[in-house]
Amino acid sequence: MGPSLLLLLLLMGAEIAFGEGIPRPVLSSDRQPVFTGNTVTLRCDMGQSRWRRWRFYWYRDTQTSDPVAQTDGNSYSIISVKVSNGGQYWCRAGRGDPIYHTLYSNTVWVKVKVNPKAVATPLSNWTHIFIGETLALRCDIQGEEHNDWQYSWDKNRTSLKYQWQNYTIYHAVESDSGDYSCRGIQMRDSQTSEISEAVRVTVSEKPNPVLRGPSQTWLTEGDSVTLSCEVRSSTTGWRFHWYKTAPYSPELVLVLHENRRYSLQLVSDSISGAGGSYTLSPAALRHTGVYVCRAERGEPAYHTEFSQPQPLWVTGVSPPASVIIHSNWNLIFTYDSLSLSCGVQGNSTGWRLRWFTGRGGESKCPTDWRSETGSTCSIRSASSSDSGVYWCLSKSGEQSDPVNITVHTGDVILESPAHPVTEGDPLTLRCRYRYKPSNIGADFYKDGTLLQTSTTGEMTIPAVSESHEGVYTCRNPERGESPESWVTVKASHSEPAPLLAVQMMVGLVIVFAIVRILAWLYCFKRPQGKSTSHLVFAGVLAVQVMVGLVIVFAIVRILAWLYCFKRPQEPVTQTSVTGQEQQNTSQNQGASQPAGSNGAQSEYMTMKRVVGATPDYANINLKCVPLQKNNKSIYEVMGPIKAEAETEKKSEV
């Protein structure tokens, strides 16, 4: 017997002598159950055994099979657990040569579950946010209770050292853009879930919403118009607010746009999902003005910038006031004087002139979006920035028709009436040169077609008709061509005469029928043998004859009126007038317009957009396009228009 075997037998005998017997290890697991992808560690504990040189053998599913692993220590770790690693496990220890084995340990079941996946979702329905906005993300573990987990967050695969379920980006900046993901960590055994799919967060500059309006911004009372507001590159969750420019007041919203200030008054709200639209139907004079929109979303609300201004000009059939152009022309040269006032039937107190131009306040009138303290505004030396739209506003909110004024930088303009011309009235057009002598020979055009050539620079139409309505220009071969001027022809005030005559005729027919019925009833019921009945009947017959003659007279009058109304118009003729007579003719023509029609000047805009010019809100570049006839919406404003409220200046011109 060898020395080693003898030593082993002595040791075993000593253990038996001391009452220890063959030991049985105790097997335990640090995680139960274990999720795939995690690590589980089994521990085989030998208790109080004094011999420390044990080697440990690990078995799965059966004790008779070969061990799945052997370790010098009493622990066995399965890294990145798979479902196939699940089952029953035992351990036992051995030592010596030949090996002396302990008894098998108790059984431990290793239960393997598929690792749940984390899901990162934004609490809002958008991940494209803007500078200053707040965005919250939430992490959930599929199929698991929230209370069992802690969380970790990564941005671009770098840990954010954040362990809460909700991760909030406050007052976002562009550097917050990135891919955000999360995972769960079980609180009882620190197992981790599968990492979530990344949520891409994009942070952009604070947006300016885009306000879209109709192609024609000149409307007639009763028309319908819809404005739309949108936030480009982001369409989710926005609520839209609509504002209209208003006279300056401390309680209104003061906005800085293009380095200029103007005040806004909230006119309407639309809720999320309304499409960001605002409809005026039917349009009224009170809707004249300049509109802007702004969007908001989230709680607390995040607001965009204000949109660009969108003007809407509404002309009325019978406005309570009108803008009077004291020169009677809405097209003047730069450096000419210009005086505007509010013409009101009755007392003009409380009416103020307002405007939407690019002027910087070089006259006694307040700057844009401020109310004039009186109803008159005079400009001693007009500039192109004084071109724009002017209207009158009362303290009660009533408004006049808006009026377009164009200050032309060229050398030739066409002076045409600022008011509609009534059918049958004469029309005088004058081609005017900036310098002396101002009267120059010119060719006159209508809708691009040559009408006639005048050596005096003046053309007269003795009696206008509807066919004379259109766009007029004049051109001198040496001095140049004028901007376009639109002339509108309105129906004669006697136009309702046929209706009145028809009403009279119908009334007479009814009277005649009643008289006939009464006469018949009298004859039918009169007493027999009364001689006076013949006299009464004769009187009734005379009345019938008289009524019949009146009806015939009315019919003849209607036919005569229809003949006069439809008679051929006289051709255009040229009239030579002296300079003084020209001035008198122009003044008389302007004076002949009723005060109530002054507001119709808004329909004679001759502003022409500079071709190739870069949009600049410091100037007004407009183009007038005829759209409809008969005093309807006949202009379209094209190009950028800028208007804001600035501090009122008290300097006098």
Image (cartoon, helix red, strand yellow):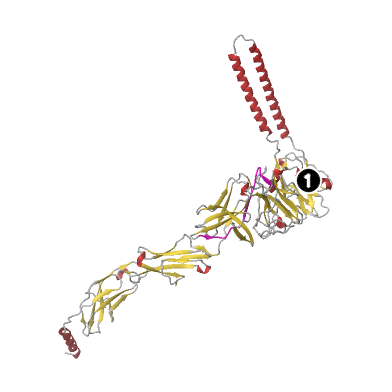
- Residue 483 visible in the displayed image: no
**Front residue of 582 and 529:** 529
User: Dividing the image into 4 quarters, which one contains the N terminus?
Assistant: bottom left
Compared to 358, does 447 lie above or below?
above
Q: Position of residue 88 (x, y in %)?
A: 25, 71
Q: If the image is split into quadrants, where does the C terminus sit?
A: bottom right
Please give left or right for residue 617 compared with residue 458 in the image.
left
How far across and how far down the image is residue 250, in percent?
Answer: 60, 58
Q: Secondary structure at mark 1?
A: helix
The residue labelled by disc 1 is 587
Query: Where is residue 245, by image quadrant?
Result: bottom right
- Seen from the viewer's position, the closer of residues 23 and 585 is 585
The range drawn in magenta is 301-322
Figure check: 343 above or below 94: above
State whether residue 7 appears in this view.
yes
List x then y, in percent, for residue 469: 71, 44
